Amino acid sequence: MIRKIEKVIILAVFLVISICVSAQDGTYGAYSPYSIFGIGDISKEGTAYNKSMGGTGIAGRNKRFINYLNPAALTARDSLSFMADFGLVQNNTLFRQNDLKSGHNTFNIYDFILSFPIYRSSAFMVGITPYSDVGYDFSSVETDPEIIGDTGNIEYDSFGTGSVYQAFVGAGVTFWKKLSLGAEMIYYFGNLDKVTNMDYANSSYRSLNSGSELTVRGLTGKFGLQYEQKLGGDVSMVVGATYKLGSNMKGYATNYRYATQSSVVDTLKHNVDTLSASGLKFGDEIGIGISVRGGDKWNAEFNYVRSDWRNSGLDKAAGFAVSGKSVFSTTVSQSFRAGFEYVPNRNDIRYYMRRCTYRVGAYYDRAYYKLDGNNVNSVGVTFGLTLPIYRYYNGITLGVDIGQRASRRNDMIRERYAMFVIGFNIHDIWFQKVQYH
């Protein structure tokens, strides 16, 4: 009976993925008007396991899942175990500003990670995930009668696409069965394209096309530690911390402006600048966390993450800064995250749903930028479920993140979203000696 349930689950998941792929609108990695600034909308890190726990993981030690939020957590595993994680995300967002309303949905792959042991109490991982996304498309029409009375109708159109990814390799080791240390090398790479058009209905005026093509590169390191202490019985507590170095941003920024009239195109500006010469930087990041686990039954965790972008230079650099009526400025981003998971009976051989893991979480985030001096905050709740498949720790993790970013105050754009994630947890045992009888 349980094997039949597992087959139905797998079939249903692939059906959902097919529907999501056919229903997605556009090719954006993510979509938000706020992604017009800087390097775009920074992704929520973590696998489906982390995302359904409110984004926690700094103090998480779970041998059934890869937890790359803290490289020290790599050693939480069975010996000789090979692990892999592959995830998909589908996001649906409703936007509102004053009386204007719109909606958008996206679908994307968000991680691919492999992890395996090295020697005794040490382990290794390699993976790739999105770091930030640019995705927006909006237009407006000039309404000032003194302007359009002379020039005719003018339409402004702005759109942007692209992503910055992070590829990483990391390793962790445990000492005295309590203290785990980890280190990770991260390489940022990607291309961002931001375009603004000004079109005149009167053909006697030249339309303007301007924008930036950004090639972003960077290299940084991340360090983590976890300390586990038994509290009695099956209950244990883990304290964790991470620190990611701020690093220089490398690559190129091509900023251009063209004037077009009929088939004649004049180049008004075309500069190629080196980002490293501009002094641009990725913000550093520090995180702390604490978790309490009741054996293989339940787990509760709380995290705090802080990242300082005030000296990144993004609010002044061409191609990253935004000029116009609205002013973006960099600030310190902060995040408070909490999560809880529970398993009724992991070894139940009669009722499948008692073997499943159930999760709930909540978070409060403050973005790395301000809009007209106002913080852009997000608040949301998460829910999740891991469905065990076949043997070992193989499973499918389903999660949903329901939240809101910003508000309608101060002429800001409010975003209400529902993000669905699907993670495939792959687990196997390597180097087993086969015995013949």
Image (cartoon, rainbow, N blue to C red):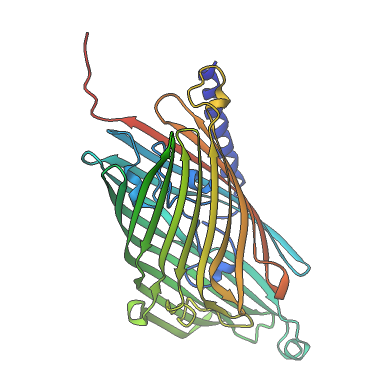
Q: Position of residue 302 (x, y in %)?
A: 51, 52
Residue 62 visible in this rendered orientation of the protein? yes
Q: Is residue 417 left or right of residue 190?
A: right
Position of residue 233 relative to residue 90, above or below, is: above
Quarter occupied by the C terminus: top left
Among the 4 quarters of the image, the one containing residue 64: top left
Q: Position of residue 130 (x, y in %)?
A: 44, 56
Residue 46 visible in this rendered orientation of the protein? no
Return the residue found at the far top: 437
Position of residue 189 relative to residue 340, above or below, is: below
- Residue under the image location 72 percent in, 72 percent down: 409
Q: Position of residue 17 (x, y in %)?
A: 55, 39
Return the residue found at the far front: 232
Q: Position of residue 173 (x, y in %)?
A: 26, 47
Position of residue 275 relative to residue 87, above or below, is: below
Position of residue 173 relative to residue 394, above or below, is: below
Q: Is residue 411 left or right of residue 385?
A: right
Quarter occupied by the N terminus: top right
